[in-house]
Image (cartoon, helix red, strand yellow):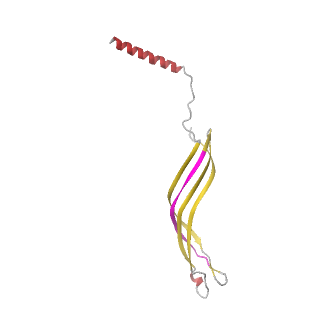
Amino acid sequence: MRALSVGFSALAAIFAASSAMAADMPLYKAPPLYSWTGFYAGGNIGYSWGTSNTTVDFFDSGTGVLLASPSGSFTMNGVIGGGQAGYNWQTGKWVWGLEADIQASGQQGSGTFACGPACAPPRACLAGEQPIRAHLRGVDRKEALSGVRATR
């Protein structure tokens, strides 16, 4: 039993000495937990739906006179997706960056526009009805970014 008591006393003395040494160590500033500096990339995919508002002009095929300009709309739907990539630099609370993205789209739609009574004989339109087809191919952007970090 006496040996066990001596062992515990020795262990307690080691811990007491190490905590005293820790109090004498120089203090270091902790590194920041995170930084906005670095490269990033990502992708996206989704579905888009919308409306195309269009005006079609009908002309007399003999004289070239405008006969009618009906306006109308048709739906445009399709898959849209793309990717983006950029790089940010953080200096203090300020964050600066460059980003580029590209989006491709399968969004499309079609409609038919009729000339109406203005195309009735004796006038002759090139076509009494005009089919319209629209397709949104995609977009790309390049931009510079700046901002202030809102956290500590």
Q: Nearer the viewer, residue 33 or 105?
A: 105
At which x and y percent is residue 87? 60, 46
- Can you tell which quarter of the image residue 90 is in? top right
Q: Nearer the viewer, residue 137 or 124?
A: 137
34 in relation to 98, above or below: above
- At x 51%, y 18%, the residue is 21
Q: Count up the numbered dots.
A: 0
- Can you tell which quarter of the image residue 51 is in? bottom right
- At x 58%, y 71%, the residue is 54
Q: Quadrant of the C terminus?
A: top right
Extreme-left residue of the structure:
1
Q: Quadrant of the N terminus?
A: top left
- At x 53%, y 64%, the residue is 107
At which x and y percent is residue 33? 54, 36
Q: Is residue 77 left or right of residue 144?
A: left
At which x and y percent is residue 8? 38, 16
Magenta: main secondary structure? strand
Extreme-top residue of the structure:
2
44 in relation to 125, above or below: above
Residue 85 magenta-highlighted: yes
At which x and y percent is residue 56? 60, 74
117 in relation to 152, above or below: below
- At x 58%, y 56%, the residue is 102
Residue 133 magenta-highlighted: no
In the rendered structure, which segment of residues is drawn in magenta?
Answer: 68-87
